Image: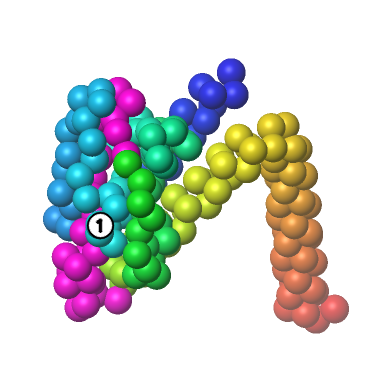
Amino acid sequence: VERGREERERRRRKTEESPQVTALLERASVKHTLKPGDKVPGVSSSHDLYMVREGALKVLVEGKVQVEMVEGRCLGFTSFLSNVAPPAVEVLAAKRSSVWQLQHQKLHEELSSSPELKARLYCFLCRLLDDQLRHTLRDIFPGTWTHLEAQGRERQVEVQENHKMLLDRDHDKAKARFRGG
């Protein structure tokens, strides 16, 4: 049940891309269609970001699987965002997969004249990274993160209710001033 919910959430997040961001991703990406066992090219030698659009990838270090990256996850955030050398890993398709290689240099050229698009892209990337970190925490500490998310939702509702109460109070004060009272 939990995995099914996570899958729906991943699909929903993928659709949160704005049309502008989707078009940018299309222009600045090399698309790879992989069969099970195919190696993802360039992972250990570029500063590109790899987005799993469909399927799943296995990340291997010294021949041992360290993590599986499923649809909606990204690989290479650190080297992409901070321009540091990527780690020495091998990445293989676990099943038939579609991977977009978001080319660092091409993206930089595309964004140099559009600060608004740059902001939209980095907002989208932050949501992806947030989603990925939440899933990693769930995997490492099963059950714990779900409890914290529930507390966060409760706090969010509380904040929204307080905000509405303040708005209502301010509205009542404004009405009273208007009536002369």
Residues packed near mark 1 inside 10 Å, few (<14), some (14 to 19) or many (20 plus): few
The residue stretch that appears in magenta: 91-115
Q: Which residue is mark 1?
A: 45
Q: Residue at x 38, y 55 (%)?
A: 87
Q: Is residue 108 magenta?
A: yes
Q: Secondary structure at mark 1?
A: loop
Q: Is residue 179 visible?
A: no
Q: Position of residue 24 (x, y in %)?
A: 21, 58
Q: Residue at x 18, y 52 (%)?
A: 29
Which quadrant holds the N terminus?
Answer: top right
* Left or right: 19 in relation to 124: left
Q: Residue at x 42, y 61 (%)?
A: 78
The structure's colour scheme is rainbow
Up/down of 106 relative to 154, above or below: below
Q: Position of residue 181 (x, y in %)?
A: 85, 78
Q: Is residue 102 visible?
A: yes
| Callout 1 amino acid | Ser
Q: Is residue 145 magenta?
A: no
* Left or right: 22 in relation to 4: left
* Left or right: 174 in relation to 100: right
Farthest-out residue, top: 1
* Left or right: 74 in relation to 151: left
Q: Position of residue 124 (x, y in %)?
A: 40, 56
**Residue 111 vs residue 73, the one in the foreground:** 73
Image quadrant assignment for residue 65:
top left
